[in-house]
Image: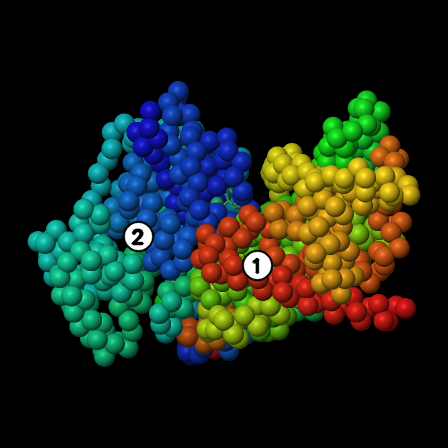
């Protein structure tokens, strides 16, 4: 059966209202939930089994209204209009009902087949809010149900109502809100014209189109102009009305419309829908936390302390399990060397696969702890405070407080990924700030770069690993900020956009939620290591093995070590590495590392695995199970200066292939190419400068 | 005595009611979407480390916006 034949239910509502939590509860999916507005930026689809039948559920990005300014709002609106779900569940945060109803009212004006779910009833009750749901249902003429999505309370009851509506669709006429004498008159005449000409009426209700003309909605105006000449007439009426409003009231029609909508909602509330008791525990708790955590001096200090503590926790907790995984792969490679006869197969298994992929796998414990702590911070609501505290600073660099989250997702606190990070930039309203965020997000210390840094700092700065990692993270941020400033001064100039953001109340994360997050991201890491990285490792192993050194040349060499070295040099990869060496030497990077860095264009994890293979291939005795770290430490050229330059280069150079594709998708191919070129260029220049200066200073 | 002033000048924890939102275009829309409309009660909860943005309590939520945005919101306070 085709997907479109399934019944479909869309979840719409304000950001952070709990739509994805409900979606997960219904479909058993594990979509990302977070206590931060704007986590979901794409439509997500899933199937729920309700009374033995399949119901297609769509999770939408959160929106505050249907005015569609940013891409994810347009996604939400377009789904509602073009896909026409049979039922739209309006997921509202009951603890700020008025604001959430603002969207619901617009959905009703659009004529969406709405069922309201008042979510977060637990919080509303703790705040002492009393909501008379039957009364609200009566006044609006649609079902209103209580919900605590986080605990699954009320989900069955909600679905019972939803399925009954799927069986017997109820066609409620679009809601008619009065916008005062001036606008109502204009709306009526426009509505009449629209209906007469059937102008876009296959898509939208007539009065809604008229409203959008008054609001000068860019998307609707563009559609209207394509649809026919009536558009010009409507625009004329709208313009005349606007001029009238401006001259008499000094406001735009869109402001009047918003005011009347809130007026309509306030009148509903007064009709006995909402009453408040005094208990404001929840808010009181959140406010007390904020008094400390966003305090003017203490706030920033605590913020740095939290991030630093995160790294210390990762390394102290992760040390032991990391030792186990390393020991395991050392043992495995020993066993494989024993079991397999000397030759190409052994080389492939030991050098190509175990040393390559094993290197990536052995970081799983650290990555897992990192993800866990990050999920904790995200779920408590602290990240929104970070955005709030940093907005002023970010604005100086041409970014926006909301750039913080994409940067953090990309690895700003370590262990993220630029792919979801780049996508999270959708919540940024202004295309300029969004682009600047997208182009600088890959500078963060993502989960794939972490192993490289952990490896190298372990070799050259074993005593100060946590500090070194923290410094690298800060360098990533500094690069992103300075990079953004330069971009915003040159290629993407433009004014700053408003920073209007909701700070959600602090919530205590559930252990289940944290474990799901941690596992989800760790599993992605493992899956990637087992598939893409494995394939690239084998490919690179082949490139490092073929063509093989001619017999007579090998015979002329004094010992096995020299043969191994010469063989690697003779291979394709070795030749590429050597060809780049004159350039990379300036940054203290040798030809073996060049091979790894070239591999890193595909995926950053490959850097560690390729280094593993390159060093193990050059090794005389493959059974000698010394780890890559020991091999690096034994290399006299691998000085502190070279190590720092290398880490800097890895931090900044070209985003991995998947990220480049994502940047392409989120902007266009020119910016994707630009991103690759400018970051590699910057990385090279900086690495050379740092290596040259440090070599002089240290020696 | 009621007295109208800009939201920027509001003291921390001083109760006020929004009189009008004069912001235009996208900024105006964003502000209104967040529930900042005439007749709504607001108070300043706090200011960020560099005195900007400012955090407001509105309709049971905490909203933050920048000072130059707060300039476009007029509030009424009781003296
Ligand atoms: N107290 C409480 N918290 C809830 C409830 N439902 C969801 N949450 C929490 O609210 C936060 C937001 O939930 P999400 O499901 O990510 O919200 P969303 O509507 O998908 O948000 P966006 O994707 O940003 O639009 C998370 O921290 C949830 O754990 C509930 O019924 N009660
Ligand atoms: Mg969501």
Residue placed at 77% from the left, 56% from the top? Answer: A590
Compared with A100, A27 (above or below) is above
Q: Is residue A261 visible?
A: yes
Name the spot of residue A561 as percent of width and height, x first: 88, 42
Residue placed at 21% from the left, 52% from the top? Answer: A176
Q: Nearer the viewer, mark 2 or mark 1?
A: 1
Q: Residues within 10 Å of mark 1 (few under 14, many from 20)?
A: many
- Residue A393 is tagged as none
Q: Is residue A522 visible?
A: no
For the residue pair A236 and B76, the one nearer the viewer reads as A236
Name the spot of residue A159 as percent of width and height, x first: 39, 30
Work out how far the residue at label 2 is from the one at label 1, CA to CA, in angstroms: 43 Å
Q: Secondary structure at mark 2?
A: helix
Q: Are marks 2 and 1 in contact (CB under 8 Å)?
A: no
- Left or right: A21 in relation to A144: right
Q: Is mark 2 within 8 Å of ligand 1?
A: no
Q: Secondary structure at mark 1?
A: helix
Compared with A47, A246 (above or below) is below
Residue placed at 80% from the left, 71% from the top? Answer: A693
Compared with A230, A7 (above or below) is above
Q: Is mark 1 within 8 Å of ligand 1?
A: no
Q: How is the image coloured?
A: rainbow
Q: Quadrant of the C terminus of chain A?
A: bottom right
- Residue A676 is tagged as 1
Q: Residues within 10 Å of mark 2 (few under 14, many from 20)?
A: some
Residue placed at 74% from the left, 28% from the top? Answer: A345
Q: Identify the residue position indicated by label 2 in the image.
A: A106
Chain ID of residue with mark 1: A
């Amino acid at each position: 059966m085709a997907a479109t034949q399934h019944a479909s239910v869309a979840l719409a509502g304000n950001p952070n209202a709990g739509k994805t939590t409900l979606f997960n509860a219904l479909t058993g999916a594990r979509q990302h939930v977070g206590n931060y507005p704007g986590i979901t930026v794409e439509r997500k689809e899933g199937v729920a089994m309700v009374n033995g039948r399949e119901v297609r559920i769509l999770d939408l990005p959160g929106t505050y209204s249907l005015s569609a300014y940013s891409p994810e709002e347009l996604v939400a609106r377009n789904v509602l209009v073009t896909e026409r779900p049979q039922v739209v569940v309006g997921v509202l945060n009951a603890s700020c009902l008025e604001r959430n109803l603002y969207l619901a009212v617009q959905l009703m004006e659009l004529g969406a087949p709405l069922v309201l779910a008042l979510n977060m009833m637990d919080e509303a009750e703790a705040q002492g809010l009393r909501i008379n749901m039957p009364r609200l249902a009566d006044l609006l003429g649609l079902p209103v149900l209580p919900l605590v999505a986080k605990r699954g309370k009320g989900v069955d009851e909600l679905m019972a109502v939803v399925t009954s509506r799927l069986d017997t669709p109820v066609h409620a006429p679009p809601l008619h809100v009065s916008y005062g004498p001036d606008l109502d008159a204009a709306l009526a005449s426009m509505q009449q014209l629209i209906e007469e000409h059937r102008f876009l009426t296959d898509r939208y209700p007539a009065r809604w189109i008229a409203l959008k003309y008054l609001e000068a909605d860019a998307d609707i105006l563009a559609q209207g102009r394509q649809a026919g000449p009536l558009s010009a007439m409507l625009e004329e009426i709208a313009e005349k009305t606007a001029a009238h409003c401006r001259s008499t009231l000094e406001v735009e029609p869109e402001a009047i419309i918003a005011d009347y909508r809130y007026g309509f909602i306030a009148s509903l509330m007064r009709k006995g829908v909402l009453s408040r008791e005094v208990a404001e525990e929840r808010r009181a708790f959140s406010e007390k936390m904020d008094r400390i955590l966003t305090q003017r001096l203490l706030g920033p200090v605590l913020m740095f302390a939290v991030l630093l503590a995160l790294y210390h926790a990762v390394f102290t907790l992760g040390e032991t399990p990391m030792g186990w995984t390393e020991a395991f792969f050392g043992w495995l490679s020993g066993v494989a060397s024993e079991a397999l006869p000397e030759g190409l197969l052994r080389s492939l298994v030991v050098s190509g696969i175990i040393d390559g992929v094993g290197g990536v796998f052995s970081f799983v414990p650290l990555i897992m702890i990192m993800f866990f702590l990050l999920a904790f911070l995200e779920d408590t609501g602290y990240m929104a405070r970070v955005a709030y505290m940093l907005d002023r600073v970010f604005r100086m660099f041409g970014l926006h407080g909301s750039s913080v989250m994409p940067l953090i997702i990309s690895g700003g606190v370590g262990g993220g990924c630029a792919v979801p990070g780049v996508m999270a930039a959708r919540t940024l309203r202004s295309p300029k700030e969004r682009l600047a965020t997208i182009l600088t997000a890959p500078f963060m210390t993502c989960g794939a770069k972490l192993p490289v840094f952990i490896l190298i700092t372990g070799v050259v700065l074993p005593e100060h690993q946590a500090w070194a990692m923290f410094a690298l993270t800060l360098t990533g941020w500094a690069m992103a900020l300075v990079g953004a400033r330069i971009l915003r001064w040159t290629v993407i100039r433009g004014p700053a956009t408003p920073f209007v953001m909701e700070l959600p109340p602090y919530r205590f994360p559930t252990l289940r939620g944290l474990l799901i997050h941690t596992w989800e991201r760790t599993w992605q890491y493992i899956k990637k290591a087992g598939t893409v990285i494995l394939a690239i490792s084998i490919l690179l192993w082949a490139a490092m093995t073929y063509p093989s050194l001619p017999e007579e040349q090998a015979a002329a060499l004094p010992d096995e070590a020299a043969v191994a070295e010469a063989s690697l040099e003779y291979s394709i990869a070795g030749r590429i590495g050597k060809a780049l060496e004159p350039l990379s030497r300036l940054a203290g990077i040798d030809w073996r590392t060049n091979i790894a860095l070239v591999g890193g264009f595909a995926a950053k994890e490959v850097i560690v695995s390729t280094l593993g293979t390159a060093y193990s291939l050059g090794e005389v005795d493959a059974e000698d199970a010394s780890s890559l770290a020991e091999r690096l430490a034994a290399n006299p050229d691998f000085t502190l200066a070279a190590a720092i330059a290398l880490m800097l280069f890895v931090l900044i150079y070209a985003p991995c292939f998947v990220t480049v594709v994502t940047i392409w998708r989120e902007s266009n191919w020119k910016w994707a190419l630009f991103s690759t070129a400018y970051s590699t260029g910057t990385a090279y220049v900086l690495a050379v400068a740092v290596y040259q200066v440090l070599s002089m200073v240290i020696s | 005595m009621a007295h109208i002033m800009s939201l920027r000048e509001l003291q921390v924890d001083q109760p006020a009611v929004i009189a009008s939102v004069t912001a235009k275009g996208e900024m105006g829309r964003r502000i209104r979407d967040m529930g900042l409309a005439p007749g709504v009660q607001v108070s300043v909860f706090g200011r960020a480390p560099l005195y900007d943005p400012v955090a407001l309590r509105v309709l049971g939520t905490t909203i933050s916006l920048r000072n130059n945005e707060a300039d476009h919101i007029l509030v009424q306070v009781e003296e």
